[in-house]
Image: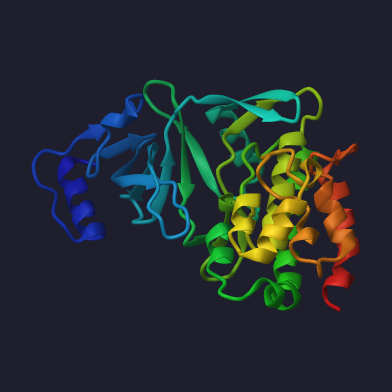
Amino acid sequence: MTEAELREKIKEYTHFAPRGQLSIITDTTEFMNIRPNDVLELNGTYYLVRGDEKEERFDLEGEPKFWVKRAVDLATGDPKIIKLVFHESFTMHLGGEEILCYRSPQKEARVLEMVKGDPAFMQGTTVIDTAGNHIRIIDKIRGNSYYEFLQRLNVDHETYFHQYLPNILKQVMSCMEAINKLHQIGEVHGDIRNDHIFIHRNNGKHIWIDFDFKYNWSENHFGVDLFGLGNILLFTAGKGLYSPREVAAWGPEGERIASDLRLEDMSLFIRHRIMNLKKIFPYIPQRLNNILLFFSCGAEVFYETAEELLEDIKECEEELVR
């Protein structure tokens, strides 16, 4: 496109005429310098940058993710999320294990290709910019995260558990099935979190997003993903996540519960998180609680596959609808 054509497209899709000379960027290496109203030229397609994505948490405006841009495809007007190359690593502590986790744009590009057409995963393509960076261009999902959905559900836990959980759990199990399929082809998600499932506004479909992390753990290639799934099950069964301090703040009954907690009741993944929900909510079936305890500090054996976890959850379903 010529600059004049780009200006017309920008005006058509944003209803504002751009001022001054357009900044057209082909090398995205210095992503901090890419600003709103810049135009990215990637593999012959032009994208108008609208701003940076943010890590949002339940009505709180999170930190901007400067390497992830909100954009408009100037050929179609479709909203896109453009993930630029950002290398980051950290060490995760899981029990006595130290696990290196790091971002890999190439890994996410590979998984995007493998899940193309699968509605359980975000969809997109990968292009290479003029500096050789793997840029992922993602179709924007109109909706909210699973984390936001559950936090906004304004009912007490017992009502939630008996009236809402059975149907919600079916959706969560569908998400776990998708991860199991990913594992069966040798890939991992790498960053399984409650806010990495998005619920589509129009059809209610639950969709996995953001799988650019990898990890090195020789003990179990899929292990970090499995602990992530355990955390999602905990969040789903508890309609939230709880620490001893939070529970103690509920008053005398909360103080009694908190004083009864032991190390073996806590999450192996995050030590201040209560895994033994039955101590908080006695009506939780023992079978479901036992699944959660496989992810606790008191566990002596662990799940090896997502399929094993799913089989155990399926056996709990009848108890939840009684």
Provide residue 10's location: percent of width, then percent of height: 22, 52
Quarter assignment of residue 258: bottom right
Residue occupying image coordinates x 80% and y 60%:
278
What colour scheme was applied to this rendering of the protein? rainbow
Camera-side residue: 141 or 18?
141
Quarter in which the N terminus is drawn: top left
In the rendered image, residue 50, in percent from the top left (x then y), is placed at 29, 48
Q: Is residue 236 visible?
A: no
x and y, in percent, of residue 44 in the image = 35, 37
> Residue 20 lies in what quarter of the image?
top left
Q: Which residue lies furthest to the front in this view?
A: 252
Q: Residue, x 89% and y 55% (percent of image)?
A: 312
Up the image or down, 235 lies above or below 187; here it is below
Residue 91 point in image, percent of width and height = 61, 24
What is the quadrant of the C terminus in the image? bottom right
Relative to residue 243, is residue 304 depicted above or below? above
Quarter of the image where one finds residue 288: bottom right
For the point 81% across and 66% down, the residue is 284
Q: Is residue 83 left or right of residue 246?
A: left
32 and 269: which is toward the camera: 269
Compared with 186, 240 (above or below) is: below
